[in-house]
């Protein structure tokens, strides 16, 4: 078997994982979920869910990946002393689900690419809201443009993956993640300076008791899982590239905090602008594509150059954020193909591109104006993520030997701080996370 590559440093680990985590989920999905599910109450539930449930699940996935040093497919069956069949199926699911998501995600990545081109052509200057709505509708329901933007987008990501863990994924993430933070902060400053922005800030931060219901928590948790790329084998796969002496708790917490921060910054960049433009915050998945161009256009009449530059930076941020996530999805497939069938990275990346690219073309064609847009956001995917994540925590909590888990999380007891923390983390993984995930799952069916 080929020698497995490793990430070079802690920064590299955090940036690569944050790259997977930070994506359309933060910029595109988070704002409309906040809008649809009652503003601040959702935001607070999301923060609580991330720290209490998602972070322990994240640590469990990294632990599983590093301990097994295999792709997501083999991780559980390799670590199960009894070699029970169930874990093979679970492994298979953790390859199949991300590949399905990849097809859709890349189509939406293609949309952002299209908008980036539009912004570069100064096309948003002076557009009216109706025009930006029909631009979006016409674009996604047209045949060829979304297909080629999707294919170009996916090919670029596959190319980076083909170059390798260190010289492809690590290098790209180290370059882009800091830049993304700079871009989103710039956007936020701009957005907060718009007249009427205060309303958006209040919407994000002032809890509205009437929005408080169990469903809010269910959605917040789904969003949190999606945002941290959990339940899809991506973090397990990246975990297998983490060096043996790396502190898993610090890297995981670092990633979770970056992801959380980025979602909040993106919310602060988008919501005030949405309110300033008088758009309904609950407009759904089309929110940023329909709303954002108008935001730039209203300013564009007075300051066409400035507004176009900001529009370019904004869509560039979306494209890059989506790319680092797609890269980690492709890596799930590439790691699997390399391990099971001995394919080289370039061949595996090309094959993933061909299969997911073609299915993605069908997805792209299935988008009548808005009708299918919900697919990525559909709760069915969130539910699948929850099932997978549930299996992982049950696996790490009950099937793997406690001593092995301790050994992995504390690096053989060498990290004393982790040793003290271990009891808490283990409890969260073994009891709190599965119970929360299960109750959310059941609640979702009852309500
Ligand atoms: N976390 C990504 C985002 O916020 C989306 C995502 C969900 C993902 N699951 C994934 C990305 C698995 C890569 C792998 O946009």
Image (spheres, rainbow, N blue to C red):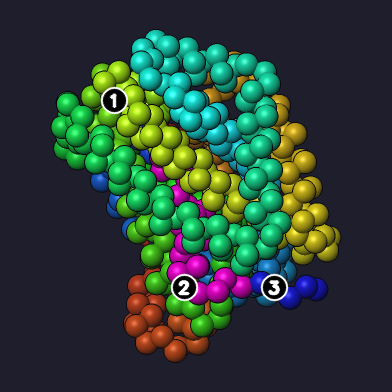
Q: Residue at x 71, y 56 (%)?
A: 162
Q: Mark 3 packing: few (<14 Cα in 10 Å), some, or many (20+)?
A: few
Residue at horizontal 49%, vertical 15%? 135
Mark 3 to mark 2: distance in Å? 17 Å
Task: State the image coordinates of residue 166 (x, y, percent, origin top left).
Answer: 61, 67
Q: Quadrant of the C terminus?
A: top left
Assign a secondary structure to mark 2: helix
In the rendered structure, find residue 303 and report the number of the disc placed on it: 1
Residue pictured at 24% horizontal, 25% vertical = 275
**In the rendering, at what x and y percent does residue 302 appear?**
26, 21
Indicate whether residue 178 is drawn in magenta: no
Residue 4 is marked as 3
**For residue 282, what is the image quadrant?**
top left
Residue 121 seen in render: yes
* Label 3 SS: loop
Residue 342 position within the rendered picture, expressed as x and y whole percent measured from the top left: 83, 63
Q: Is residue 247 left or right of residue 331?
A: left
Which numbered disc flags the more N-terminal residue, 1 or 2? 2
Residue 144 in picture, x, y percent from top left: 68, 21
Q: Is residue 343 left or right of residue 82?
A: right
Query: Number of marks in the image?
Result: 3
Residue at image point 48% right, 46% down: 321
Q: Nearer the viewer, residue 376 or 10?
A: 10
- Which mark is drawn over residue 73? none
Task: Specify whether tag 3 is near ligand 1 (CB below 8 Å).
Answer: no
Q: Is residue 439 visible?
A: no
Residue position marked by numbered label 2 in the rendering: 10
Q: Which residues are magenta?
A: 6-27
C-alpha span from label 1 to label 2: 43 Å
- The kind of secondary structure element at disc 1 is loop
């Amino acid at each position: 078997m080929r020698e497995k590559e490793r990430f070079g440093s802690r920064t590299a680990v955090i940036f690569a994982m944050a790259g997977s985590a930070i994506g359309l989920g933060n910029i595109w999905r988070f704002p409309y979920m906040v809008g649809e599910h009652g503003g601040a109450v959702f935001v607070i539930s999301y923060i609580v869910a991330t720290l209490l449930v998602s972070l322990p699940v994240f640590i469990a996935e990294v632990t599983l990946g590093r301990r097994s040093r295999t792709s997501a497919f083999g991780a559980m069956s390799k670590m199960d002393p009894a070699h029970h069949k169930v874990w093979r199926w679970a492994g298979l699911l953790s390859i199949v689900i991300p590949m399905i998501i990849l097809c859709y995600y890349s189509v939406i990545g293609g949309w952002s690419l299209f908008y980036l081109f539009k912004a570069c052509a100064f096309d948003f200057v002076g557009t009216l809201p109706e025009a930006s709505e029909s631009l979006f509708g016409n674009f996604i329901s047209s045949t060829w443009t979304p297909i080629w933007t999707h294919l170009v987008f996916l090919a670029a990501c596959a190319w980076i993956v083909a170059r390798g863990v260190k010289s492809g994924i690590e290098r790209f993430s180290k370059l882009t993640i800091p830049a993304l933070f700079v871009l989103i902060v710039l956007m936020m400053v701009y957005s907060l300076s718009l007249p009427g922005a205060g309303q958006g800030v209040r919407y994000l931060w002032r809890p509205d008791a009437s929005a408080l219901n169990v469903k809010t928590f269910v959605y917040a948790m789904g969003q949190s899982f999606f945002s941290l790329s959990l339940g899809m084998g991506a973090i397990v796969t990246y975990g297998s590239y983490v060096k043996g002496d790396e502190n898993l708790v610090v890297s995981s917490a670092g990633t979770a905090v970056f992801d959380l921060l980025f979602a909040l910054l993106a919310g602060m960049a988008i919501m005030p602008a949405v309110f300033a433009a008088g758009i309904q915050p609950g407009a759904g998945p089309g929110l940023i594509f329909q709303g954002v161009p108008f935001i730039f256009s209203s300013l564009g009449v007075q300051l066409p150059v400035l507004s176009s530059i900001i529009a370019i930076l904004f869509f560039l941020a979306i494209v890059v954020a989506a790319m680092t996530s797609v890269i980690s999805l492709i890596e799930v497939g590439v790691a699997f193909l390399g391990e099971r069938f001995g394919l080289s990275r370039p061949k595996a990346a090309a094959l993933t591109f061909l299969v997911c690219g073609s299915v993605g073309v069908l997805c792209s064609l299935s988008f009548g104006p808005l009708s299918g847009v919900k697919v990525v956001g559909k709760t069915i995917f969130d539910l699948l993520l929850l099932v997978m994540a549930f299996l992982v925590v049950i696996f790490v909590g009950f099937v793997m030997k406690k001593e092995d888990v301790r050994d992995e999380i504390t690096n053989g007891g060498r990290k004393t701080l982790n040793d003290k923390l271990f009891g808490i983390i283990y409890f969260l993984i073994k009891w709190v996370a599965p119970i929360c995930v299960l109750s959310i799952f059941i609640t979702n069916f009852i309500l």
